[in-house]
Amino acid sequence: MNSRARLHATLNHQSPDRVCVDFGATFVTGIHVSVVHRLRQRLLGNGTRLVKVIEPYQMLGEIDDELRAALGIDVVGTPPRTSILGTESKDWKPFTLFDGTPCLVPGQMNLTPAPDGGWLMYPEGDTTVPASAHMPEGGYFFDAIIRQEPIDEERLDPEANTEEFGLLKPEDVVYFRERKKWFAQRQEFGAMLIIPGTGFGDIALVPAPFLKHPQGIRDVTEWYISTRTRRDYVWKIFERQCAVGLQNLHTLIDLFGDLVQVALITGTDFGTQRGPFISVPSYRDLFKPFHQRVNDLIHRRTQWKTFIHSCGSIYQLIPDFISAGFDVLNPVQCSATDMDPARLKREFGRDLVFWGGGVDTQKTLPFGTPDEVYHEVRQRIGILNEGGGYVFDAIHNIQGNTPIENVEAMFRGIRDSAKG
């Protein structure tokens, strides 16, 4: 099997020749640029080649063709035209992280010193407006800065919370046409498309660090409260967002056609470490109708499988994810309450492809020994890949302070799983 056939079999719950592997196809299955740099040094020895930061908010590094081949990765993906910080992936310039990692960042990534010794980042790199993100001294990624204007209940308008959701612009269409060519040049790989504008209530997007002057409800706490106290307001936001998202979906389906195998719909987290963030009735009332509309359109017009990312303990919500039309669940946070991989595989493995969960990024991968990492990887693959329906990835993005020996042990465990 080549990688595309391997992913096809996996998505159709058939046993591939070996476990399908994804690192770097999405903003939730990535590797920090520091780790990508060290992997390149270990495997390829390209001392002068700088790794591009393709997702600057989380500082995720590009998995290029050469490194992808060396690691045995099967899936490629395409990010949106602009990042969560409003930058475009062009005009690359050299940069050095706090840990000394040299890399390339987008030309619009203009930083100023923060009072704590860290860095401040600005929407679209425009330093004439208030900073929208902060990386503390010694840190590895950015946190959004809340820029909440005073809320006037009488003048609260859903349009203020939807200014970022618009029809694809001409420059967006040009960008996606170029990405179609990029996919076409890599047809031997599995293909993932990230759908813009369908992450209803994604809390990473609520503060809008890509907007220069965000309006509406942009405070994280206030947003969560609003899903209860301003339910009708949030519903109107989702209606507007969905209407635009569906129109853009038609455009993307017409453009990409059968090149794409999986569509990432949403990265909204519904779980905490110990339980769901939201009750089942609330999910059914406020989120599920919009998930169904998006999934129904994709399934009606394409053979694409739809992908939901939701961290934490979401066992209680999984039956509704399935009935909402999702085909793929990520990240499979096995360290959370009620998320035992064997139980998930037994109860939901016929309906869902599990994508992730291959090693714990909270404890084992960053703090365990290489042997502990290796054995956890082999165990998870043995459970989740039985009978197909599993794509290997870590539970979440691999962070910058992860020991390189542990990352190597993870990939060794993946390779050895193919040997039986």
Image: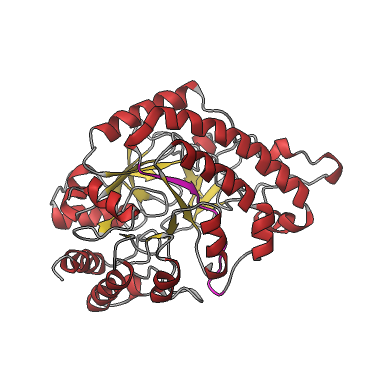
Q: Is residue 30 left or right of residue 413?
A: right
Q: Is residue 183 visible?
A: yes
Q: Quadrant of residue 241?
A: top right
Q: Residue at x 39, y 34 (%)?
A: 107
Rendered position, 216 above or below 382: above
Q: In front: 189, or 273? A: 189
Q: Which residues lie in the magenta part? A: 261-274
Q: Is residue 122 visible from the viewing direction of this image?
A: no
Residue at the right extreme? 154
Residue in the image at 27% along x and 72% along y: 382
- Residue drawn at x 66%, y 66% as measured from the top left: 279
Q: Is residue 195 left or right of residue 51?
A: right
Q: Nearer the viewer, residue 299 or 48?
A: 299
Question: Nearest the camera: 250 or 202?
Answer: 250
Horizontal and vertical percent position of residue 308: 48, 53
Relative placement, left or right, of 73 versus 309 is left
Residue 265 in magenta stretch: yes
Q: Position of residue 41 (x, y in %)?
A: 17, 54
